[in-house]
Image (cartoon, rainbow, N blue to C red):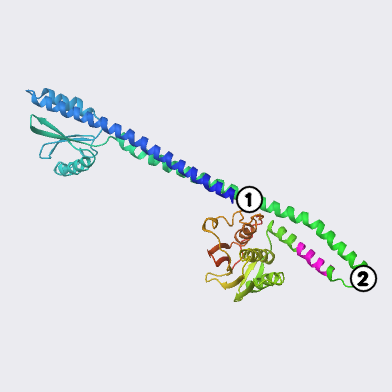
Amino acid sequence: MTKYSYTVNLKTGLFALGVLIVAGLLWYSRSLVQELQDNERRLVDLYANMIAEAASEEGGEELGFIFDQVIQQIQFPVVITTPEGEAVSWRNIEGADEIDPDDRQTYLGRIVARMDEIHSPVAVRYGELVISRIHYGDSSIVSRLRWLPYVEIAVVGLFILVGFMGFTMIRNSEKRSIWAGMARETAHQLGTPVSSLMGWIDILRNKVPGDLEALDELESDVHRLEQITDRFHKVGSVPKFEDLDLLMLAESSAAYFRQRLPTASETTITVSGDSVMVPGAETLLQWTLENLIKNALDACHGRKGIIEVRVAAVPAGGGSIEVCDNGVGISPRDRRNIFRPGYSTKSRGWGLGLSLARRIVKDIHRGKLRLASSKPGETVIRMTLPGTAREETGQDM
């Protein structure tokens, strides 16, 4: 659990760092835009003062110079109107020169209204008299800069998303290779001593007279080891599917644990539901179901356990098996981690049972294995299997 807490803290820290970087980028870009807007405002104020000063002089030479040589050189959109709002001059207004003169004032009026929502117009005064108003908007560079941080965030976010998806695919591929390699190596390592044990059992049967009950039990356990070896071998390869009855599979797994419950145990394991046929690998699905029942037994430790295995058909086709127990339940903080490799709430647990079970159901059978619900006194884990076999890819897990 410690390493998963560390992982969660690391992810939280990286997320917080990302938020700070984005916030810093937005603040810096906003400050640049605000600075440019302030500069443009000061420039418009300067033009307004120059126009007012020129208007106070006799003659219109200086006023004409300001309009022709100064106003015409600016890079941001500007409209000069009379006090009544009629446009008399404009600059950098897209489409204003091509529009019909009868409609031009209406068009420029809409432009002026939008610009006034962003910047207050500057009044050109002659004494106390307002002789015109200068309406202006943001230059193209300011407009682009306003959207720049969002474009950058979108591009970086897309790059991170693609990188994360690629990294996840590579990591999952590596995990499948590790699982397959581990399973095959385990099957190989178990094969030799199991074969040797079977040989020794045959020798003992020939040499030990009388009651051979102990040898029968020993042989049963060796057959169990053979079954485990076969399971690991099939996990590491593409198994052959056959039609299975989920109700019989559930009853077989439940019977296995009933025989091994302590004599004084008050725990009950019941199976209910209808017969449902699905394609699958019996050895692997039985292994999965045994893992689920074993976890349910562990959850009921120290109390009178009630474990129910419920089989049902799925409307979309296929079937489901639910393992329900009245154990202690799973805490909310652990629910996202129970299927992760290496995660275990047990002091001596390896954290491979549920992870391996999900791989058998999801990767091999194209089904689903999830925690349906959990609270103290009731935990339900549901395994759903499709009604048709997966396509054989010829690839290992």
Hey, what amino acid is under mark 1?
Lys
Quarter of the image for the C terminus: give it.
bottom right
Pick the front one: 349 or 318: 349
**Front residue of 78 and 271:** 271
| Predominant secondary structure, magenta span | helix
Residue 217 part of the magenta-drawn span: yes
Percent coordinates x, y for residue 170 in the rendering? 59, 47
**Looking at the rendered structure, which numbered label has been put on residue 377?**
none
Q: Is residue 252 above or below residue 197?
A: below
Q: Which residue is mark 1?
A: 175
Is residue 62 left or right of 168 when viewed as pictured?
A: left
The answer to whether one can see residue 65 in this image is: yes
Residue occupied by mark 2: 209
Indicate the position of residue 225 as horizontal and vertical percent values.
76, 62
Count the labels in the image: 2
The kind of residue on which mark 2 rests is Pro
Which stretch is magenta? Answer: 215-226
Image x and y of residue 108, in percent: 18, 41
Residue 273 position, x and y percent, is 59, 76
Name the mark nearer the viewer: 1 or 2.
Answer: 2
| Residue 25 versus residue 67 in the image, above or below | below
